[in-house]
Image (tube, rainbow, N blue to C red):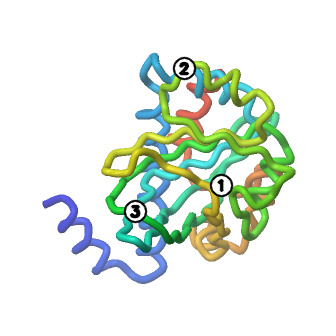
Amino acid sequence: MTRFLLAAVLALLPLAARAQTEQQILVDRATLTVQEMLAGSPQSDARNLLRRATGAMICPRVFKAGFIFGGQGGSCVLVGRTQAGWTYPAFYGLGSGSFGLQIGIQDAQLLIIVLTQKGLQALLDSQFKFGADAGVAVATVGAGVQGSTTAALKADIVAFSMARGLYAGITLDGSLISARSEWNSIYYGRPIAAQQIVLQGDGNNPGAEPLREMLARFSGG
């Protein structure tokens, strides 16, 4: 019922307001994802890594489906960490396709912790493909897997996943991250590049304060 009510409200809004509402929904879902993935005690590895992170990408819902041909996709937000704290979010999309023996449906949440400036700069590129850049080390682990901190010490990027569905696990190899510049412009009311938001701490929208506060809570400030 709530979903139908939300759809009815969105239909009545002007186009610009509707787009901003969609973005705010994504930011709100990202906040909940951080809470859900880091609140429990088994997630200590992810919290430890977040304390020394240079940035984080949160994908509240990555949907994967396949029958011989397959694919996965979702919307994400990327935040950086400056001396002043966590920045406001820049918007990205994630997608990939695959071919092979596969069948199933999966719905996953992703928390991608960026540990180095090299990893952060790679994600900031207009298009970044996981597994294609040999100079950027990416480790993918299930949320709550103990010992992952040790395994990820040399990684530039560590992706924690929490998935539900028929697939055994989620892989990011071959997945493409694409910047959504138009979403940045609408959310902040002016043209603004992801680099300005994530590296320079530019941009301001009160709707993202809960996300910044949630990240600060789990990263120690």
Mark toward the viewer: 2 or 1: 2
Q: Residue at x 45, y 51 (%)?
A: 60
Q: Residues within 10 Å of mark 2 (few under 14, many from 20)?
A: some
Q: Quadrant of the N terminus?
A: bottom left
Please say if the residues under marks 2 and 1 sit with CB atoms less than 8 Å apart: no
Residue 17, percent from left and from top: 44, 74
Label 1 neighbour load within 10 Å: few <14, some 14-19, many 20+? some
Mark 3 vs mark 2, CA separation in Å: 28 Å
Q: Quadrant of residue 128?
A: bottom right
Nearer the observer, 72 or 195 = 72
Looking at the picture, which amino acid does disc 1 mark? Asn
Answer yes or no: do the residues labelled 3 and 2 have beta carbons within 8 Å?
A: no
- Circle 1 SS class: loop
Q: Could you give the CA–CA distance between mark 2 and mark 1, rounded to whole angstroms?
A: 36 Å
Looking at marks 2 and 1 on the same chain, the residue that comes earlier in the sequence is marked by: 2
* Quarter that holds the C terminus: top right
Residue 54 percent across, percent down from the top left: 77, 38
192 above or below 24? below
Q: Which mark is residue 102?
A: 3
Looking at the image, residue 196 sits to the left or right of residue 149; the answer is right
The front one of 210 and 75 is 75
Name the outermost residue toward the front.
101
Name the kind of residue labelled 3 in the image.
Answer: Gln
Residue that badge 2 annotates:
146
Tell me the SS state at disc 3. Answer: strand
